[in-house]
């Protein structure tokens, strides 16, 4: 189920069954769009029923959600800012999924990436800002890469279930962050909210010109595009797909499955660690408990909603970033708990997973079956 | 011996007491998961069920004044979550692990949604039995103040251990878990058996949640469960799907969870957060030590996706 529908290759010039080739080509691909969109609509409809059941107006809710997340340039920028860590966190799920692995501990990579970046930023204080920011990025990627790469290594070399181990390691990472932030890395000036020493302003990452959105968004989009190229256009991506389908077959073909698994999980963790670094360098200014804000968990939903396709992650992250961003407005305007957004996300998640059962069931999406009917 | 000044002996005693206190939710969740996994499915969503059970139990106990009604509400809520998981996973292409992850998020979200008004008020606790009344040392009394749910959990573990081997229901469960084809050949419907097994598993996890909010730590907060439900799933694998093993492993995990507070009580505050992480680290180490890439796990149900 972690695999997207395999492409049918280059469209032929004529249709074998007398239908225009273009129509067949579209039909084969439409399934990957129509089913998730339909699931999204069904999920939102179910959530409307839930909102009705608690005595509120779903119309007002979706209107508020639209206004809070997408209705104005201001709210769109807010949504884009929130989507940037989601882009990277979703890759933590989507890249290993190519190998058939379900990694859900991205939160740990975010947290440790952030702490590593903040520590390097403080240690290198005084160096040119270009070097410091680069070093922070590298530190975040290494921390996250080691953390999630270890999950992959445990999976391959010790057969430890990656879903459970990655989530356990996320809890360990959060404990480690608390220990470091309240202990050796603590800025004595941070009283109520233990934090690392704040980064000097020159080491902070600014906004994309003309927008109130930090550069993390561009980094996230770039990471998604690179991941798509890796998966779809390189031999490593192809090998990963083979290994994800059948490990034994891949080994018989002489593929280095171990290296693939550690490489993909390590890269996934590195991207996610970068999300932590960006949170520190562009948003928080220091590492503290706010790093564990749940982006890693929303990222799981983003990846599943995008069916682990890195390009699809971009619009889905924007959508969920917007839903996240509207949470505050919904809370204030409609007197609903801030967990309202979590309920919606949970419902969407379940409906999306349920929609997996409809792939391959509709004749309209499968030209091979058209002739029999007509 | 001075009754209050038992010094460093307080640490193992506090760990023992903590093990009994902390382990109870682990016992219920892992026994529930053992039933579910024996039927060939894995429900990672028990973490969400645990949180929702904790909220439901606390809310009902606040509103009715009876912790037992709260317990029943939690079990019923858990049953519903479990039945939903069991039902939705019978469809082709629906992955039980992924649905579990979704239910983990959904259950917590729903619990936070409905639990908001219940963070402030206090609910009546589930009763405890003072098994340490014979001693005049307060620490011993505190350690042996055992909640009834712990005793029920222990009894349930023994019962399930017996029932898996010696009853018709236990045989059906194991057949379905080992081979869907064999079960169908026997005229059993694997989906129905799994539906019931996941439902019972959810109900037990709900009871575990009720223990959290109604006894220890004894209040409803949004951070009430931090991965206990998930650790319990790992613990079932470590216990090789044996209910008695689940009980023993739950005690071990409870002890690990009590390590941090116990050390803190005698003045060791260094590395508090790392001791807090002890149960997670212990789980991970146990998973690494007991898994192997070259042989399949002894006693694993054949239909279980996690061990394939």
Image (cartoon, coloured by chain):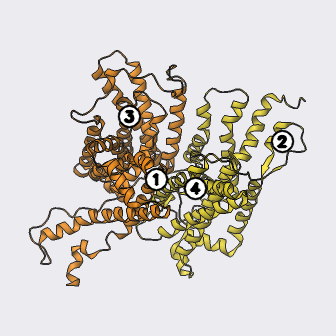
What crowding class fits label 2: few (fewer than 14 Cα within 10 Å), some (14-19), or many (20 or more)? some
**Inter-mark Cα distance, 4 to 1:** 15 Å
Give the residue number, with chain letter if any, for mark 4: B52
Depth check, front residue: A351 or B284: A351
Q: Which secondary structure, mark 2?
A: helix
Sequence order check: which comes first, mark 2 or mark 4?
4
Camera-near label (3 vs 1) is 1
Q: Which of the 4 image quarters holds residue B120?
A: top right
Sequence order check: which comes first, mark 3 or mark 1?
3
Please, which chain is the residue tagged with disc 3 on? A
**Inter-mark Cα distance, 2 to 1:** 44 Å
Q: Residue at x 57, y 73 (%)?
A: B193
Please, which chain is the residue tagged with disc 1 on? A
Q: Which secondary structure, mark 3?
A: helix
**Inter-mark Cα distance, 4 to 3:** 31 Å
Q: Residue at x 78, y 53 (%)?
A: B127
Chain that the image shows in yellow: B
Give the residue number, with chain letter if any, for mark 3: A279
Camera-near label (2 vs 4) is 4
- Report the residue that reaches farthest toward the left: A13
Q: Is residue A92 visible?
A: no
Give the residue number, with chain letter if any, for mark 2: B141
Q: Which secondary structure, mark 1?
A: helix
């Amino acid at each position: 189920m972690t695999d997207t529908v395999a492409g049918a290759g280059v469209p032929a010039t004529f249709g074998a069954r007398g239908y225009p080739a273009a129509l067949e080509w579209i039909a084969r691909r439409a399934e990957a769009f129509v089913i998730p969109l339909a699931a999204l609509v069904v999920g939102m409809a179910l959530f409307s029923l839930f909102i009705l059941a608690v005595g509120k107006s779903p119309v007002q809710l979706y209107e508020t959600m639209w206004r809070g997340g997408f209705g104005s340039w201001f709210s769109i920028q807010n949504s884009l800012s929130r989507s940037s860590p989601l882009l990277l966190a979703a890759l933590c799920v989507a890249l290993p999924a190519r190998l058939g692995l379900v990694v859900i501990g991205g939160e740990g990579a975010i947290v440790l990436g952030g702490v590593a970046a903040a520590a390097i930023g403080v240690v290198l204080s005084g160096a040119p800002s270009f070097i410091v920011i680069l070093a922070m990025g590298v530190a975040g990627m290494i921390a996250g890469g080691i953390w999630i790469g270890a999950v992959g290594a445990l999976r391959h070399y010790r057969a430890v279930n990656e879903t459970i181990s990655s989530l356990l390691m996320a809890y360990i990472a959060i404990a480690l962050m608390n220990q470091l932030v309240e202990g050796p890395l603590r800025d004595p000036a941070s009283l109520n909210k233990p934090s690392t020493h704040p980064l000097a302003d020159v080491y902070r990452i600014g906004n994309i010109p003309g927008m109130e959105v930090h550069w993390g968004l561009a980094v996230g989009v770039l990471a998604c595009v690179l991941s798509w190229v890796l998966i779809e256009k390189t031999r490593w991506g192809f090998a990963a797909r083979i290994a994800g389908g059948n490990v034994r077959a891949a080994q018989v073909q002489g593929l280095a499955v171990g290296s693939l698994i550690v490489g993909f999980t390590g890269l996934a963790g590195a991207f996610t660690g970068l999300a932590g670094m960006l949170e520190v360098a562009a948003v928080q200014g220091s590492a503290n408990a706010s790093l564990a804000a749940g982006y890693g968990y929303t990222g799981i939903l983003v990846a599943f909603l995008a069916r682990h396709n890195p390009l699809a992650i971009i619009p889905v992250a924007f959508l969920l970033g917007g839903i996240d961003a509207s949470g505050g407005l919904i809370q204030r305007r409609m007197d609903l708990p801030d967990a309202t957004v979590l309920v919606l996300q949970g419902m969407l998640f379940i409906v999306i997973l349920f929609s997996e059962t409809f792939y391959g069931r509709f004749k309209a999406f499968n030209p091979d079956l058209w002739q029999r009917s007509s | 011996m001075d009754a209050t000044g038992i010094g460093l002996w307080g640490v193992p005693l506090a760990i023992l007491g903590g093990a009994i206190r902390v382990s109870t939710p682990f016992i219920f969740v892992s026994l529930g998961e053992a039933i579910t996994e024996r039927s060939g499915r894995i429900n990672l969503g028990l973490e969400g069920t645990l949180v929702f059970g904790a909220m439901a139990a606390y809310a009902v106990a606040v509103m009715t004044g009876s912790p037992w009604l709260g317990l029943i509400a939690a079990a019923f809520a858990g049953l519903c979550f479990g039945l939903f998981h069991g039902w939705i996973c019978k469809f082709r292409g629906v992955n039980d692990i992924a649905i579990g992850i979704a239910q983990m998020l959904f259950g917590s979200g729903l619990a936070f949604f409905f639990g908001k008004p219940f963070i402030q008020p206090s609910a009546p606790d589930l009763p405890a039995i003072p098994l340490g009344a014979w001693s005049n040392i307060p620490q011993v009394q505190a350690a042996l103040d055992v909640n009834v749910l712990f005793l029920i959990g222990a009894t349930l573990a023994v019962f399930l251990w017996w029932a898996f081997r010696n009853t018709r229901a236990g045989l059906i469960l194991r057949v379905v878990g080992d081979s869907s084809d064999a079960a169908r050949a026997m005229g059993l419907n694997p989906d129905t058996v799994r539906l019931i097994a996941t439902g019972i598993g959810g109900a037990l996890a709900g009871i575990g949640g009720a223990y959290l909010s109604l006894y220890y730590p004894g209040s409803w907060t949004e951070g009430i469960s931090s991965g206990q439900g998930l650790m319990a799933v790992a613990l079932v694998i470590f216990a090789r799907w044996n209910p008695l093993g689940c009980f023993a492993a739950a005690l071990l995990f409870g002890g690990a969870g009590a390590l941090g507070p116990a050390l803190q009580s005698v003045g060791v505050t260094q590395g508090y957060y790392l001791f807090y992480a002890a149960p997670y680290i212990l789980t991970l180490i146990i998973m690494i030590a007991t898994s192997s890439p070259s042989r399949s796990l002894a006693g694993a149900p054949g239909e279980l996706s996690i061990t394939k």
